[in-house]
Amino acid sequence: MTIPRAGVPAPKYQRLASDLRRRIESGEWQGGAQLPVETELELHYGVARNTVRLAVDVLVNEGRLVRLQGKGTYLKQQPLLDHRVFGPPAAAGSDCLDAPTRVYAEEAAAAGRRLAADFEMLVVRARSDIADLLGLRPGEAVVVRRQLRLMDREPYSIEESHYRAGLAAGTPLMEPEAVPGGDETVLAAIGRAERTAVDHLVARMPGPEEAAWFEIGPGVPLLVQTRVTRDHRGPVRVVETRYAADRCRLLYGLAAPGR
């Protein structure tokens, strides 16, 4: 079997990686299955051992394969987990801006996975982009409530909610722990219930600390969702959530007005 050639010549190992990727995506090997050993791939493709190793390295770095010392190379066990980031109200009287913690818990339970989270509260100087979205001057103080979520002990997402210091002062948002029912309950109690939201989505490569926490290879990008929520008075908070692209797919639901 020959390795398919693209329009622009590419190194042989990249073309081999492309064909292995195609076979994985076609379902030829299912999650958790062992990849054929290097000698089988050498014979099948008619390439050198080093070409096979470099191609497999590419897919390991993309998070598609994992190497187990002394056992071989396997497809990643867990499939992508769908996360409903935004959707139409599920029932009359419900809010399309659902509490993220509840949504995560429901999705984990449906997938048969175990959700855990570590919580932190910090007071920091606002980054220039966060300050602009909140209508602050760069460097003004903001309260950051951070959740580090894990699925079956695998790092899944980093969520950081940024609040004006004046809005959070004197409320449970200043407590170094999660609020029962989510921050949404506090905002509603102080008359700042979120009514609308705009999401900014980008994909970027992780920094060294992010790559270390997510335990991802050098070829896996992050999906970064920045949500700005508002009420009738203006911006309420900015929520920046980062996901590893090899383990999460973001879902957005739409509905026609009045339906």
Image (cartoon, rainbow, N blue to C red):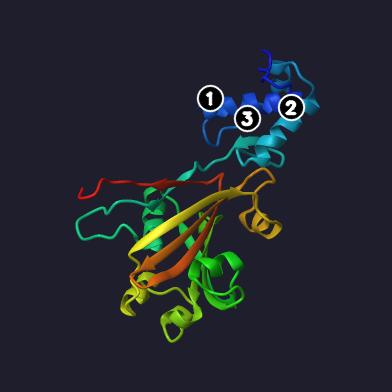
Front residue of this view, candidates 81 and 226: 226
Q: Which residue is mark 3?
A: 35
Q: Position of residue 235 (x, y in %)?
A: 42, 69
- What residue is shown at x 40% (from left), y 62% (from top)? 101
Q: Marks 2/1: CA distance?
A: 20 Å
Q: Taking 39 as reference, is 79 left or right?
A: left
Q: Taking 12 as reference, is 66 left or right?
A: left
**Is residue 182 visible in the rendered structure shown here?**
no
Mark closer to the chain start, 3 or 1: 1
- What residue is shown at x 52% (from left), y 61% (from top)? 240
Q: Position of residue 164 (x, y in %)?
A: 49, 77
Front residue of this view, candidates 85 and 138: 138
Q: Position of residue 137 (x, y in %)?
A: 57, 75
Mark 2 and mark 1 residues within 8 Å of each other at the beta carbon: no
Find residue 13 and name its label.
2
Identity, as a three-letter code, of the amino acid under mark 1:
Glu
Judging from the image, what secondary structure is the residue with disc 1 in?
A: loop
Mark closer to the chain start, 2 or 1: 2
Q: Marks 2/3: CA distance?
A: 16 Å
Q: Which residue is mark 1?
A: 28
Judging from the image, what secondary structure is the residue with disc 2 in?
A: helix
Q: Nearer the viewer, mark 3 or mark 1?
A: 1
**Is residue 245 visible in the rendered structure shown here?**
yes
Find residue 136 and name its label.
none
Judging from the image, what secondary structure is the residue with disc 3 in?
A: loop
Identity, as a three-letter code, of the amino acid under mark 3:
Leu
| Image quarter of the N terminus | top right
Q: Taking 74 as reference, is 151 left or right?
A: left
Identity, as a three-letter code, of the amino acid under mark 2:
Tyr
